[in-house]
Amino acid sequence: MSTAQQTLPAARAATKAAARRTRRRRGIWDILGWIYLVLLLIFTVVPMLWMLSTSLKSEWAALQQPPQWLPSNPTLRHYERLLSPYSEVGPTFLRYLFNSFWVSSATTVLGVMIAIPAAYAFSRFRFPGREALFFSVLLRNMFPAVVFLMPLFIMMRWLHLVNTHGSLILTYLTFGLPLSIWLLKGFYDNIPPELEMAARIDGASRFQAFWRVVMPLSAPGIIATAIYSFILAWNEYVYALTFLNNEERLTLPVGLQRFFTEYASNWPGLMAAAFIMSVPVVALFLILQKYFVRALTEGAVKT
Amino acid sequence: MALTTTRARPVVGARPARRRESVLARIVRHWADYLYIAPALIVMLLVIGYPIYYTVYLSFFATPPSLSMDEKIWVGLDNYRRILRSESFRDVTWNTFIWTIFSTFFAFVLGFAAALVVHREFIGRGIVRGLLLIPYVISAVAASYIWRWLYHSDSGLISGVLMDLGLIDRPINFLDDIDRVMPSLIVANVWKEFPFAMIMLLAGLQTVPEQLHRAAMVDGAGTWHRFIHVTIPHLKGVIIITTLLLLVTNLNSFTIVWIMTGGGPAGASEIWITEVYQLAFGRLRFGLASAYSVILFIVMMTLGYFYVKALTRGDRRRRPA
Amino acid sequence: MTSQNDRRILSQQLTRRQVLGLGAAAGLAAAGVAPTNALAQSDKTGVDPEQWNPETIRQMAGTLEVNTAEEVAEVVPLDYKGKVSYWYVGPNEASSEIEKQVDAEFWAAFKETYPNIEVNVQNLDYNQMLDKLRTAALGKAAPVVARMPILWGVEFAAKGQLSEISLDEFNFSEEEFWPGALKSVTWEGKRYGVPTNNETMGFIWNRAIFAEAGLDPESPPATWADVVEYSKIIKEKTGKAGYGLVARVNAGNTPFRFMPVLWAYGGGALDEAEPNPTYDKIYIDNEGSQAALQTHYDMYVRDKSVPVGALTNTQTENRDPFVAGQLAMMISHPSEYAAIIDAANKATGEDKVIADQVVESMAYGLIPEGPTRRAVVFGGSNIHIFNPDLVEGDFDRDAARALIAFMCGPEWSTKLAWVSSNPGNIRGFRTTWMKERLETIRFLDVTTSMLPYGIPFPVIPESPEIMNIIVPEMMQNALTESMSVEEACQTAREQIEELLTGL
């Protein structure tokens, strides 16, 4: 509307009319937008609230029909049991939690360390087979985990990695890599090589130039890839189920299943475990989400 | 130094001079470049290369449950023939199709609409955006249990609320009914996936230059008109990538279906992936499961071709430095 | 409130522990006075399976004094130094407190008896264990010893993945075990395991609901046709679910609850219910099988008298409504009694009142019979030693033998089966522990007296697939009405045929 800079009164009037029309139409869209947003929020939030509410009930209250929206006798018992090192299941659950942290962190750090040079090379260098290799790296996402279970198990056994966290870290690395490389490559593509060159003319080595110039500019991309890898590793279930036998080494998603076995249906306990399991990744993601959006905006989505 | 500059320079200018060089010579000259991608490639080769080889190899054998794997029987292409001819393959393929298409469609539409709404400035936008993103981050295992619990026929929330409202007089079985199971699973899946579409498209929307919108507005274009003629064309790339990623993810998704229904009831929610798992681990037909997987690979590769083309598209049009 | 509950459970545990201790002491005292068993008996076990009823079971309990350490010392010296890895389906989140406690006591006792044998124990979930064992055996990462549900062993044996064993090497004799159990550890004439426990289920009903529906609270349905009728009446009169039907695929407890009906009507998967099964005839689509499936169709589709979630629910999900007084009857595992009591103890306020009422009005009876017979699944577990080639790390057969001899002797086969089943070792029935069990756990005599009606699943490697997949799928096909009862049975027949003849 501020762009109306015509001097003729007629023209000004026409613009005003157009703007009014637009505003009116905007109004309808705005209202529709709000309605949609409210409905979507209900759809998104109710399942999570239900998880939280159930986790605060006793096993009995949870089974009541009609269901109680809010527990009439809220109890933190399930959380206490899971998180107290003195309870019967607590130490095991804390162990799972720790294992998940360790596996996910190791995957993240290694993943970023591998993705950075690869993305940089795909962006800067023109070596033969570059496109084919880039293509094949990206193809990882095409393969369903389930299909590879058996051959990978046999391979892990051959590498003496069965029942170790190494088997999971190695496998998880490949989940995050394609998107990481792709995202980071987008960033490097957008950083003019001249910047690096300028640094090198000033006497910096190739690595120094990379470290001082390219790294800071691609920080959002690195943070985004790190979150992405962490979340993928944190949530993975099928491989963890197959590769690990030792109870002391299990990760959370598999541990979660212990609460819902053939003979168990402790829904509140299960929901409490699901909640605890979600907290770290949700928190991490919410704190760092702006980097994620920025990374996608600047790195990948930009064409 | 000189080497670096030539490397860093865009391909366009340098190419004609290098044409005549043999591939081998180029590889040798560029040997140092490969060091950068070596770790990534080694990991990928190990975790993908070997399993692919093994899966293809095994797909030519029969592995009856009464024999050990060392006694497997060579059957050539028999496994493929059996799968493609079987009636269940048709059903499972149909289910997979429904599952993938509807999940993708709804996740995309919901996500796109959400991105448009959340893209606008308003108070509390950060919080709303954060809330909407949570399902994407929650693990599939947790999400499956949450939804199974919501759908629970005898003490689930949804049945309970509907009964409370007097809309039904008997609990509804969402996951036990052959007609309701697929839609129910798709809803749970869309819940988990729409945030991904939202965040991708939100990132895309932020790259649409404000001037384009203003210019269109001066021309008297309404919101809808601007959406169709300005926003959509600008987002074409992101839309393609998001859709493809969603398609691939859904085609590959296992956990939600497996934990919620295991493919039941009466196979009404059996999709390719759960069928492969069931064949391999439930029925111990590793040969048959491998053949199934190979068929799956082929479909995936076709999709993958488009996916990678979409991903690398920007790469070729890279602006000169 | 919470801590009060915990304390209650705790105090219960304490008394249980005291009782166990006392029981042992009382056993010592009783040994001298106990009347000698009048049954016709074998020399070693003193038990005659022919004469098996609650009466004789009570009579023989407490007539035998066992010193486990002495017995096992003859198998492997007590100072033996070694290592063994062991996988089993142990107590989990939902197990009763007693079960968890007995498990812990077992490991403590083993440590005391064999202080130098190191056991690497993996407690796995039932539904995960089969997949994991299969993968592990394929990847040559199997444990040395595994205790598996009765249904699984033969598959591993047929593939040559288990070590052959003889009962002699544990100082056991054939008559110490049920013939059906021994059959389940035998493949092509060779023995591949030792039975650890045998379980049979009973029928459980809520008398209060029966009364409410105008049925005689003291008499359970005598036949499966009665079950259908009662279920319908209960639904109509009270609005509560009648029979606790389960038909989930790939869940162990579906065949355990459906096969008894098939057999009762003269059906079956193969001819496993016949006196001398050959496992080469398919019964799944005979008239009996169809009639049996029809009963479930009638309850689920026609009368809608069973829990709505029958096709996805596991048995535990039926247990909850049962405890809440919303479900009138079901086939029940003996351990469910303990679990139900636990659940009742955990309830508070109004729930507690309801739960206590349910416990009060709970009754156990024999599983109903059909036109052909009364039947129950002869279940339980066996313990196996894997093939040395498939084991990761050391293969110490002596350590494995020590563990198996210790576990399958009369003492621990009784104690480990405390709430859930019957000792695999028949001598266990004569021990003082058995006597104590019978005194402290209600209904045990009922489930135990179902043993003679027990029919083992077919002892063929394809059994898990038939029982866990084909049979439940047949039920689902009929119950979802995607096929008629007849079609569902025929489809199942085709699947079994293909399974047995094809590759």
Image (cartoon, grey):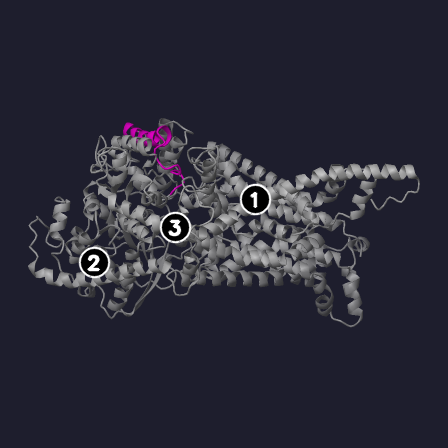
Separation of disc 1 and disc 3 at Cα?
Answer: 26 Å
- The answer as to whether the residues below labels 1 and 2 share one chain is no
Is there any visible trace of residue B305 in the rendered image? Answer: no
Q: Is residue C65 above or below residue B276?
A: below
Q: Is residue A196 above or below residue A266?
A: below
Q: For this rendering, which residue is in front, B180 or B55?
A: B180
Per the rendering, the mark at residue B172 is none
Q: Position of residue A245 (x, y in %)?
A: 41, 58
Classify mark 1: residues with Cα within 10 Å, few (<14), some (14-19) or many (20+).
Answer: some
Residue type pointed to by label 3: Glu
The residue where tag 1 is placed is A42
Dot 2: element: loop
Q: Is residue C469 above or below residue A124?
A: above
Q: For this rendering, which residue is in front, A24 or C125?
A: A24
Classify mark 3: residues with Cα within 10 Å, few (<14), some (14-19) or many (20+).
Answer: many
Per the rendering, the mark at residue C409 is 2
Find the magenta span and give its range: C286-313
Task: Give left or right: position of C70 versus A154.
Answer: left
Task: Give left or right: position of C27 versus A108.
Answer: left
What chain letter is assigned to the residue under label 1? Answer: A
Separation of disc 1 and disc 2 at Cα?
Answer: 59 Å
What chain letter is assigned to the residue under label 3? Answer: A
Q: Is residue C63 magenta?
A: no
Task: Give left or right: position of B4 versus A145.
Answer: right
